[in-house]
Image (spheres, coloured by chain):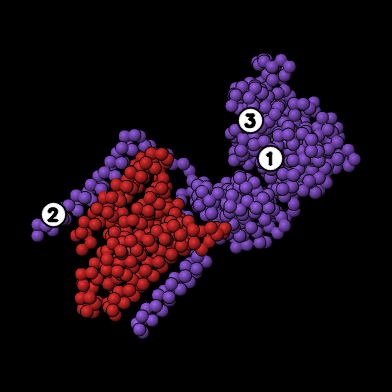
């Protein structure tokens, strides 16, 4: 149903318009065959894009009453939430996919290091999984799409900028661990860190469990 | 009510489980460096030094919160911490913690690096893998290095605070973990075993028998910093000749205005170093007020000898052998570039004994005196030279795994093409497919 709405097409167009302009500018300035600057840019744009892709997922079902029908038909909350999340994640990956064009261009005109490319795109996929998880959670809390989008954006920004509030003197301190930006930066630099992978996976699991709880709660009401 | 309680408990459990799992994941983390040059990993030399740290150590980096390199420095220090839990790392903004910076001897407006182990402290002006590792290496070496300054022949004195003394250098060396001693070969013609390195700072009187003592010391695997000067008539070539180097009397005159003090062609500024020697690696610009020339035989046939020029003038300079008539005479003077600093390493098996002699020789002493050692990177040059001379391993030559530059052939036409493709065609395709889907759904 997601692809039958105009949302992914418009979001995808705006995403690549902004990403193309910004990253090509970066390349023109740096004159280096490096993919690393792509990921923070794509990450930040994804931060705005993901709530738009997920805002409908459960909120719309709740608003139209189909959620009640599904629950009355015995559909359990966890598979429902999982299905919604998978759909949103796959959609976000499909929207992201044309960014691979940059890999081709860099390989065509230079000799880029494949390591940061692999790590960066793995990181971006995990980052998209986390953002869609947060989006599905936000969507499960309300029947209003705009509210779901705003809550998801707020949560995503909170995690993105967690390191800004970090004034602890020790490198690797607590808030730094929560920062999605720092986690994505690690991937973008070319490192596959098990703690970063675990953080993204755990955050997805946590958001989906909480979203399932919220959907169960609706049934009780 | 029971349902609500159950959900609240579930939420609390999920959050707690998340916190526990994240902590476990952090503590058991493994990092796989996928970069071609392993540029996200510490070098093998650094790993060796870090593993040798057996006491609680603090690495404190003063880096501005808005410094573009802060994130990289944080990651780099984290690698030290992960490799050895005895190393605690702290990242401070010296403008926010000026008191702490001053207490640790760091100029708050500049920042820098402090490494402490017990009561011992090491400092560096730059926070890089090379500097952190060199500081750690100085702290973990078995014995504190002792630098012995030769005295008794009119050398620059490390106890004198006058402009021609070297008290400032002595202070810099002490700050960097060195012990200092004076070497009077007139009263006792032997170099104490405690001397890790010897400094011969432009004697004004002939060395006499002391020259043989120093030559023998160097021959037996000693380490020496030999500073000559145009103002001295003593020829120190016999000390450095076995290591492929020699001094040439005269003054280097710099012809490039950007590489000398305004109106003073005798005061040389070295802005860039063509040598890869650790003595000058990543060294800030240095200033030499009056230097004589040197010869450094890079192609020496002496087995085990590696000699390299570390300081040289521009092509526009020349060596003036008669300063009273400062005009280039092709018959007497030497055209630029003129070498005025060299470093030599002679390693070999001498009768079953492995010996390694290191000598750094410079054609000027003024740069290291109180009047000039505070200028630009002069103090750093002295410390780097002593580090290279006295450290057991090539620790000052730690080469971080730096990523290589990967040029992108991006003409204006290609830039336009890339922009058109990625910011034009791709968004257009999204909109086109969207419109198609919309039209198809409307048609049903």
* Residue extending furthest toward the bottom: B2
* Residue in the picture at 38% in, 39% down: A28
Residue B328, percent from left and from top: 66, 16
Labels 1, 2: one chain: yes
Sequence order check, earlier mark of 1 and 2? 1
Residue under the point 30% across and 49% down: A16
Q: Colour of chain B?
A: purple
- Classify mark 2: residues with Cα within 10 Å, few (<14), some (14-19) or many (20+): few
Marker disc for residue B439: 2
The subunit letter for the residue under badge 2 reads B
Per the model, the C-alpha gap separating discs 3 and 1 is: 14 Å
Residue displayed at 26% across by 50% down: A13
Q: Which chain is home to disc 1?
A: B
Q: Which residue is mark 3?
A: B269
**Labelled pair 2, 3 in contact (Cβ < 8 Å):** no
User: Quadrant of residue A179 in the image?
Assistant: bottom left
| Rendered location of residue A214, percent (x, y) | 32, 74
Q: Report x, y in % for residue B331.
A: 67, 15
Same subunit, labels 3 and 1: the answer reads: yes
Instruction: Name the secondary structure under disc 3.
Output: strand
């Amino acid at each position: 149903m997601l692809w039958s709405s105009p949302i992914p097409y418009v979001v995808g167009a705006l995403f690549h318009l902004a990403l193309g302009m910004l990253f090509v500018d970066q390349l023109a300035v740096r004159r280096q065959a490096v993919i690393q600057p792509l990921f923070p840019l794509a990450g930040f744009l994804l931060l705005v894009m993901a709530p738009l892709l997920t805002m409908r997922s459960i909120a719309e079902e709740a608003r139209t009453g189909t959620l009640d029908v599904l629950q009355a038909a015995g559909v359990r909350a966890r598979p429902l939430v999982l299905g919604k999340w998978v759909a949103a994640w796959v959609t976000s990956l499909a929207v992201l996919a044309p960014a691979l064009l940059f890999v081709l261009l860099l390989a065509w005109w230079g000799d880029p290091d494949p390591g940061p490319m692999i790590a960066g795109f793995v990181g971006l996929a995990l980052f998209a999984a986390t953002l869609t998880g947060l989006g599905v959670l936000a969507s499960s809390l309300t029947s209003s799409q705009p509210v779901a989008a705003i809550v998801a954006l707020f949560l995503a920004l909170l995690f993105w900028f967690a390191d800004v509030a970090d004034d602890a003197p020790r490198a690797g301190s607590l808030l730094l661990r929560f920062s999605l930006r720092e986690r994505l930066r690690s991937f973008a630099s070319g490192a596959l860190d098990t703690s970063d992978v675990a953080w993204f996976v755990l955050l997805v699991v946590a958001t989906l469990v909480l979203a399932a709880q919220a959907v169960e709660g609706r049934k009780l009401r | 009510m029971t349902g609500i309680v159950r959900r609240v408990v579930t939420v609390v459990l999920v959050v707690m489980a998340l916190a526990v799992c994240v902590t476990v994941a952090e503590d058991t983390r493994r990092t796989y460096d996928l970069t071609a040059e392993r540029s996200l990993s510490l070098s093998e030399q650094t790993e060796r030094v870090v593993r040798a740290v057996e006491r609680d150590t603090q690495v404190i980096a003063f880096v501005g919160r808005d410094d573009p390199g802060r994130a990289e420095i944080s990651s780099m220090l984290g690698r030290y911490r992960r490799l050895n839990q005895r190393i605690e790392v702290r990242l401070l903004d010296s403008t926010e913690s000026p008191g702490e910076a001053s207490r640790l001897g760091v100029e708050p407006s500049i920042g820098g690096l402090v490494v402490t182990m017990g009561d011992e402290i090491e400092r560096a002006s730059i926070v890089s893998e090379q500097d952190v590792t060199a500081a750690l290496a100085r702290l973990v070496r078995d014995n504190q290095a002792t630098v012995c300054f030769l005295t008794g022949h009119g050398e620059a004195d490390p106890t004198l605070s006058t402009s021609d003394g070297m008290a400032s250098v002595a202070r810099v060396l002490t700050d960097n973990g060195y012990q200092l001693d004076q070497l009077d070969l007139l009263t006792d013609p032997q170099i104490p075993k405690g001397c890790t390195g010897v400094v011969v700072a432009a004697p004004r009187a002939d060395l006499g028998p002391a020259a043989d003592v120093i030559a023998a010391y160097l021959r037996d695997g000693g380490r020496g910093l030999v500073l000559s000067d145009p103002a001295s008539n003593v020829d120190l070539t016999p000390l450095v000749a076995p290591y492929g180097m020699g001094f040439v009397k005269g003054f280097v005159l710099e012809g490039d205005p950007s590489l000398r003090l305004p109106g003073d062609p005798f005061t040389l500024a070295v802005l860039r170093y063509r040598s890869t020697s650790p003595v000058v690696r990543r060294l800030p610009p240095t200033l030499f007020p009056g230097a004589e020339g040197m010869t450094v035989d890079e192609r020496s046939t002496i087995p085990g000898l590696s000699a390299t020029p570390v300081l040289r003038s521009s092509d526009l300079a020349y060596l003036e052998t008669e300063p009273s008539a400062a005009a280039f005479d092709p018959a007497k003077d030497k055209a630029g570039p003129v070498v005025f600093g060299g470093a030599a390493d002679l390693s070999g098996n001498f009768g079953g004994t492995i010996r390694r002699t290191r000598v750094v020789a410079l054609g000027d002493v003024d740069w290291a005196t109180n009047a000039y050692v505070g200028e630009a990177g002069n103090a750093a040059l002295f410390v780097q030279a002593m580090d290279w001379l006295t450290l057991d391993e090539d620790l000052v030559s730690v080469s971080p795994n730096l990523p290589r530059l990967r040029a992108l052939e991006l003409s204006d036409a290609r830039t336009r093409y890339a922009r058109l493709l990625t910011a034009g065609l791709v968004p257009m395709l999204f909109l086109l497919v969207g419109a198609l889907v919309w039209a198809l759904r409307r048609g049903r």
